Amino acid sequence: QVQLVESGGGLVQAGGSLRLSCAASARTFSNYDMGWFRQAPGKEREFVSAILWSGTSTYVDSVKGRFTIDRDNAKNTVYLQMNSLKPEDTAVYYCAARLRWIISRSYEYSYWGQGTQVTVSS
């Protein structure tokens, strides 16, 4: 089982920036797709961004141009750089992991962190 620990959340003003980190305990980190999800009060958890084992990245439309996902396989760490933050970005942000599809034959994210709070004031 993979352990994921998020960090970097906090309180910022609208227009500010935060960088979230997710440290993974995976033995073969490079075989995992890594994703970021978020959940605001009273709303369903939503996909934010993912970076696949190959380095390919994807984003939900609402954060394109503002957020950047990156990974450092040597450090078993995934990052989410969040710029131009808006109040609607306020949520608990979760890191998630799944084995690459060719290995698992599944698209489900099987491993989840505990989350880190991001609050953007107006």
Image (cartoon, rainbow, N blue to C red):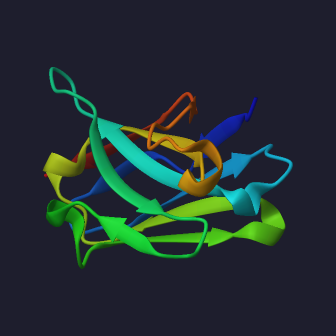
Residue 69 coordinates in the image, percent (x, y): 46, 69
Residue 38 coordinates in the image, percent (x, y): 33, 40
Give whichever of 116, 26 is nearer the camera. 26
Residue 83 higher or lower than 119, as above or below:
below
Residue 9 higher or lower than 115, as above or below:
below
Residue under the point 21% across and 24% down: 41
Give whichever of 27, 81 is nearer the camera. 27
Residue under the point 37% across and 59% down: 49
**Left or right of 55 on screen, residue 82:** left
Residue under the point 82% across and 70% down: 74
**Left or right of 6 on screen, residue 90:** left
**Left or right of 41 on screen, residue 56:** right
Which residue ends up furthest to the right in the rendered image?
27
Which residue ends up furthest to the top in the rendered image?
42
Residue 23 coordinates in the image, percent (x, y): 71, 49
**Left or right of 25 on screen, residue 103:** left
Residue 42 coordinates in the image, percent (x, y): 15, 20
Residue under the point 24% across and 71% down: 84
Give whichever of 121, 70 is nearer the camera. 70
Q: Is residue 73 visible?
A: yes
Q: Quadrant of residue 77?
A: bottom right
